Image: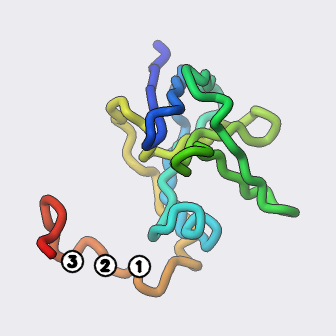
Amino acid sequence: MSTKHYGSCLCGEVHYEVAGNFDSFFLCHCGRCRKDTGSAHAANLFSTTATLTWVSGEKAVRTFQLPETRHARSFCGTCGSALPLEQMGGALLAVPAGSLDSHLANKPNAHICVGSKATWDEALETYPKIEALPEP
């Protein structure tokens, strides 16, 4: 049975559907993924069999390919939100987990590229947790 997932960008201009299952879910700590996200790591789902359909806003989707590397990312040209990307000639679909609107049952398989993680990325789970925005 095929699963369907739905996602969108922050401004709502782009909506997509992924039909199929994800093979893996990695939290990547490499410097390129940190730059892409502005965070400690990227959270991407990967599939070799799922299909991507742009429901709306496909014309707003932009892709940046880092020259002379396999590193690329797709994003909304209006708000900059990360979006799915077909890689390796369509053989691999990468979906930013945070762009999904539908429930995701998958849990990460692993943290990868931890040898190059940020120096401040240590024991993050030990810091205080605040339910909403902190008071000014």
Q: Residue furthest right?
A: 68
Residue at x-position 37% and y-position 33%: 101
Seen in the image, is 61 located left or right of residue 80?
right
Mark 2 is on which residue type?
Ala
Of the numbered discs in the image, which one, if any, rests on residue 121? 1
Residue at x-position 48% and y-position 58%: 27
Total count of labels: 3
Which mark is nearer the camera, 3 or 2?
A: 3
Residue at x-position 61% and y-position 42%: 94
Which of these two is toward me, 116 or 33? 33
Of the numbered discs in the image, which one, if any, rests on residue 127? 3
Mark 1 is on which residue type?
Asp
Against 33, residue 80 (above or below) is above
How was this image coloured?
rainbow
Give the percent coordinates (x, y) of residue 60: 64, 36
Label 3 Cα neighbours within 10 Å, binned few <14 / some 14-19 / many ≥20: few
User: CB under 8 Å between callouts 3 and 2?
Assistant: yes
Disc 3, SS: loop
